[in-house]
Image (tube, rainbow, N blue to C red):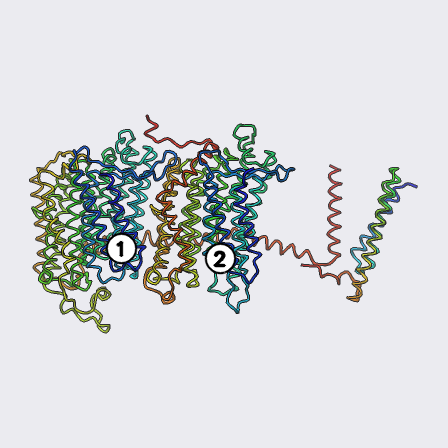
Amino acid sequence: MENLIAPLIAAPLLGAAVLLVGGRRLDRVGHWIGTLLSTASFVFGLILFADLLGKNAEHRTLTQHLWTWISVGGFQADVTFRLDQLSMTFVLLITGVGSLIHLYSVGYMEHDERRRRFFGYLNLFLAAMLLLVLADNYLLLYVGWEGVGLASYLLIGFWQHKPSAATAAKKAFLVNRVGDMGLSIAIMLMFTTFGSFAFGPVLSHTGDASEGKLTAIGLMLLLAACGKSAQVPLQSWLGDAMEGPTPVSALIHAATMVTAGVYLIVRSGAVFNAAPDAQLAVTVVGAVTLLFGAIVGCAKDDIKKALAGSTMSQIGYMVLAAGLGPIGYVFAIMHLVTHGFFKAGLFLGAGSVMHGMNDEVDMRRYGGLRKYMPVTFITFGLGYLAIIGFPGLSGFFSKDKIIEAAFAKGGTEGWILGGAALLGAAITAFYMTRVMLMTFFGEERWKNQPTRSPEAPSAEPAAETRGEHSEPHPHESPKVMTIPMIVLAVGSVFGGAFFSIGDRFLHWLEPVTGHSEGDSPLSATAVTGATMVCLVIGVAIAWARYGRKPVPAVAPRGSLLTRAARRDLFQDDFNHVVLVRGGEHLTRSLVYVDHTLVDGVVNGTAAGFGGLSGRLRRLQNGFARSYAVSMFGGAALLVAATLLMRAV
Amino acid sequence: MNPVNYLYLAALLFTIGATGVLIRRNAIVVFMCIELMLNACNLAFVAFSRMHGNLDGQIIAFFTMVVAAAEVVVGLAIIVSLFRTRHSASVDDASLMKL
Amino acid sequence: MSFPLLTATAALPALGAVATAAVPAAQRTAAKWLALLVSLATLALAITVLLRFDPDGARYQLTESHAWIKDFGVRYELGVDGIAVALIALTAVLIPFIILAGWHDADPLETGSRRWRPTQGFFALILAVEAMVVISFEATDVFLFYIFFEAMLIPMYFLIGGFGDRAHEHGEETAATQRSYAAVKFLLYNLVGGLIMLAAVIGLYVVADNFSLQEIASARANGSLHMATSTERWLFLGFFFAFAVKAPLWPLHTWLPNAMQESTAPVAVLITAVVDKVGTFAMLRFCLQLFPEASRWATPVILVLALISIVYGALLAVGQRDIKRLVAYASISHFGFIIMGIFAMTSQGQSGATLYMVNHGISTAALMLVAGFLISRRGSRLIADYGGVQKVAPVLAGTFLIGGLATLSLPGLAPFVSEFLVLVGTFTRYPVIGIIATFGIVLAALYVLVLYQRTMTGPVKPEVSAMPDLRVRELVVVAPLIALLIFLGVYPKPVTDIVNPAVKQTMSDVHKKDPKPEVEAAK
């Protein structure tokens, strides 16, 4: 059965190769080839899943060795795949949600002349992500890791003729590369510590290594996770990544890419368990990011950017849970899966809204859309209820567990982390309600927009550059787009309950990640109650601000915090001033130094010899008698020297 | 007579020749001065031969004469052709060999 | 006596060069085809060498030895180890692509120009360079190596100075001036290095009374040849200086950007992918084997210089406005990695460095040749003159991107394997240097993506709107290189299998062993 693992990755990889090399001939069928191969991968995943379920919990690990990749001295990297409960969960999420997004894109990208290539990139994305979760050693994981970075680069910059898209793609790749640096240093540290970087030898020998080394490895892994999962301080690429087509956002945020960091931390659980300092760092990063993302999400008027802030925040929850150690690993993954459902649903819903609104993304130009897009409204609404943790829906089960686990960490840390998680829940309720109200309720602000002729520039110059000038005619999206949304909505509603009843998910994952009940100062009921109170407060504030009062079509100036949040809490400005400007100055001055100093020394030497020879040339004046004088002078000197030597 | 006096004479002749080479411009005169220097050397060689009681100096003197004869042939030919083209026998006029 | 395979591999392109040069002026196309066929035949011979070579056999194989200048003990001695075999194969693989890519680079200019381009000469010179590079890889006699190491400069000088890009923004006269500046700079730098090496070669003869690499190395190993510490160090520095100029190592690098900028793209590939490799190869073969103590003594300084090369080259690449200069500075950064790997003195570092030489050759060839195709279409080397090419010529842009991704060492492509090996090899012994060098991978992403973004994405500039996509000949050049990049990235075993035993030998020459991992060491 393990021989099915390689085809699982090979199917989308083949799709990418065929679609990208095949050329224009495949333009008419390319999207179906891509969807078919991604679905094939999902089917392989299901078969393997059935096989795993038929085995004892202890024997649910399959490995497939293909070939030795690199072997130099003690450095041995194999192309070996490992399928256990953890990677199986990811495989099903990636291929399942991924296939739905493929299907959706068939409709969404229908009018794009480069659709075939888009599907090629999507398939590449899936293949890279599958390689990432199925690798049996960190170096092979690294291949998938960077492959995901490459695919996201290609997809975010898919509309390359837009300079903003090209810049966003470059930014995403570069920020990810900083994280990749962390992963490569972690691998090197593993090699010097354990003599190997395969999961088996590393994770089973953590007891023999010094804690300092393990902490270093853990921190480097955290750096890697920060890059890929858009955690503070490497989160800046995620907002800009919205430049890509909307299905890409759904894929990046729900099924692939940002979940990779959580996978890495949970997979390396043994390392973190033995390095409490690194673990603490993980929880801090998670807590900070969950608040950071939530605050940013509150201020954005661009529907996709608001959702991006939300992703950042939800991944923050997962990272926080993963940092809690065995108390949290299972819940991190559970939230990851439920989040995969509802976030994909939300993004596809947002895409559907944009599709019907001439690609308008500003929520202040939406409003009252529920009548025009009933299916989108219902599926988006269910996703919304799931993400804020409405009782009974997916998010309720998974997020609640994380908050509980945060309190269970114990001590002051537990209170701080738990408090942050609770606060995050309130803010989540606020900004998601805001998105919901601004988009589907209220007055129809897209009607009777001020005419935007060059003579009378609109009050909001930014709006002028985007979208169409004609009034949009909102309409429901075609079936090929709504069906994936419906499927995802079903998942968002029932996923959490299905996993939680009888602790199914816990029993499934426990053999890989381990699990321990923490010592919580609060009872489970108390935590749930507090969460519910936060939820109600968040929704109420949002209702008071955006439901009761009409939403102004032009963004008000807002408080200091709002303005800061609109600018991503000045993180980009910091990057721009310190890294971009600083870097430009550095390279420019280095170019100058290279030209004047390093090259100058060489050219100076050459010029020096040239000048010297120019002087010496004057001695060669052509007068025979002056040559004779120098001869006599030389002879006289020689004689004098000889006499002198004799005298001495 | 003390052979050392011949050496004094040779030194005197050499100095006169060298001064002539350096200060005279006429190529013929310069040429004659060079001959004077060569002969001064010959005189010295012969004197040394006499002083040391062997024939080496005399043999070298013969060599010098042969070289001097060859030099006269080549040198005079150059001077004549120079005079023909430039109508001047001044060495300072022939200063084209410079960079 | 068996067939002298190594001599044949070097002699065939040499004879081909003579034959190509002798083709009558009117038969220009015939000369091109002749050169291409000769290079392909050389490739066949190189593959034969590869197949006949037994990785687990003797250290030097296919050896040939004849007396040459008896008075000085100079012998015509050839032999290859795994490292040499890999590099000979690289050279033989790249030359046909270089010839094919430069198919029209030496065509006569349009009427009205005063300059005449000797087509035959261009291809003959390339073959001559190939012959000399191959024999440099094969020579196991120090003097024989030195002769060809230096003689290589002559054809390279003419290739750089005589053939430039067809169009030039400042006109043909300025271009010729800049070309000759670059060519003279190239020649002077390498001559100075070579002369210092000559002094060291003579010094070595005085000490060892022999020029044979194998004899000196074995005499040093069994202690029968003793060198005073200072003598060894001076000789080492003499050799190393020449190789560091050729490689090039910071701060001896400034000739490379000029040379690559002014020459045509195929010649630029010839410089950086083939000729420069002789420098790094010679560090492994001569510096480490002849002067093991001195090599260990100089390691810290060389590692720091290599590290500076890595970071400095990458930073300067970011700041370049000229596509070819950018690639040149990227190469300087990569040569830093190679030298770092060699002097990290671990098996991962040295195998990685050898693999790096091969991979860097292929990846630079892919990137630079596509850049050359791009430049020939627009007639400008300035990045700012391009924009939106992706929309007009998607295949060209795609291959350019793959070349770029290989340059930034994307996993799955060949350079990743070697770069990671070098980094790991360095890290196990010198963690701090390894970590700083890792910054190079971020900077590499920066310069490659900035280059790609500025040239290929964004709105289409009017000047490039009519740009044709890759032609068949150009595709024939690029596609196999990309296929090789992917193949060696996924399955580098064929190269590492050949290289590993040779590296093991070199490691024992310098009396170094890989550091043990912490956990195993504890047991």
Taking A135 as reference, is C12 left or right? Answer: right
Q: Quadrant of residue A29?
A: bottom left
Instruction: Give the vertical position of A167 relative to A181 (above or below).
Output: below
Residue at image location 59% in from the left, 55% down from the top: A610
* Amino acid found under the numbered disc labelled 2: Glu
Q: Residue furthest top?
A: C523
Where does residue A395 sit, x and y in percent of width and height? 12, 46
Characterize the local packing of mark 1: few (<14), some (14-19) or many (20 or more) Cα atoms within 10 angstroms.
many
- Residue at mark 1 to residue at mark 2: CA–CA distance: 36 Å
Characterize the local packing of mark 2: few (<14), some (14-19) or many (20 or more) Cα atoms within 10 angstroms.
many
Kindly identify which numbered label has been placed on residue C262.
2
Where does residue A283 sit, x and y in percent of width and height? 21, 41
Where does residue C91 sit, x and y in percent of width and height? 47, 47
Instruction: Give the vertical position of A385 relative to A520 (above or below).
Output: below
Specify the subunit that label 1 lies on: A
Image quarter of the C terminus of chain A? top right
Is residue C467 or residue C304 the one in the foreground?
C467
**Whether residue A268 is visible:** yes
Marker count (numbered): 2
